Image (tube, rainbow, N blue to C red):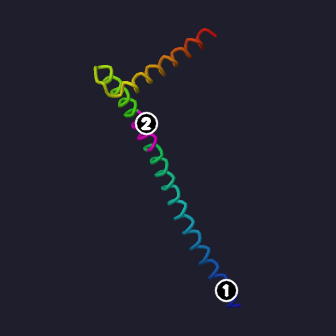
Amino acid sequence: MSNILKAIHLLEDRLGNMFSNYEFLKEENEALLQNNTKLHLLLEEKEQQIKNQKEQYDLLKVAKTIGGSKENTRDTKLKINALIREIDKCIVQLNS
């Protein structure tokens, strides 16, 4: 009979340890999920900043070229042609 009681107490102790480990891991998982969400938001923000900076850089290159600089004239012409094509597409969509 004492072996059965020892086995039951051992089982209770192990279950108690497993439950406390479960609670700890559950809390840790929640904290990691929150951190993951914050990092995803930060990443999206940084990607948007990079996109904005690239657009500003491209506009600066165009402005510099238009301002009389002989560098990047081909890029400027390509950019202007691309803008004209976009405008033409918009006009076609409006007329449809």
Q: Is residue 31 above or below residue 82?
A: below
User: Which quadrant is the C terminus positioned in?
Assistant: top right
In the rendered structure, which amino acid carries the disc numbered 2?
Gln
Between disc 2 and disc 1, whose residue precedes?
A: 1
The image shows residue 54, relative to residue 77, as above or below, that is below
| Element type where label 1 sits in the image | helix
- Spatial CA span between label 2 and label 1: 64 Å
Residue in view at x 55 percent, y 60 percent: 26
Q: Nearer the viewer, residue 41 or 83?
A: 83
Query: Is 91 displayed left or right of 67 in the figure?
Result: right
For residue 65, which quarter of the picture? Answer: top left
Q: To which residue does mark 2 refer?
A: 48
From the viewer's side, name the closer residue of 37 and 55. Answer: 55
> Which residue extends farthest left?
68
Horizontal and vertical percent position of residue 61: 34, 28
Q: Which residue is mark 1?
A: 5
Is the stretch drawn in magenta largely helix, strand or loop?
helix
Identify residue type, mark 1: Leu
Please state if 35 lies on the left or on the right of 12 as rendered: left
Residue 38 in the image: state x and y as whole percent. Answer: 45, 47
Residue at 62 percent of width and 82 percent of height:
10
Segment tinted magenta in the rendering: 43-51
Question: Dividing the image into 4 quarters, which one contains the N terminus?
Answer: bottom right
At horizontal 45% and vertical 24% (from top left) the residue drawn is 78
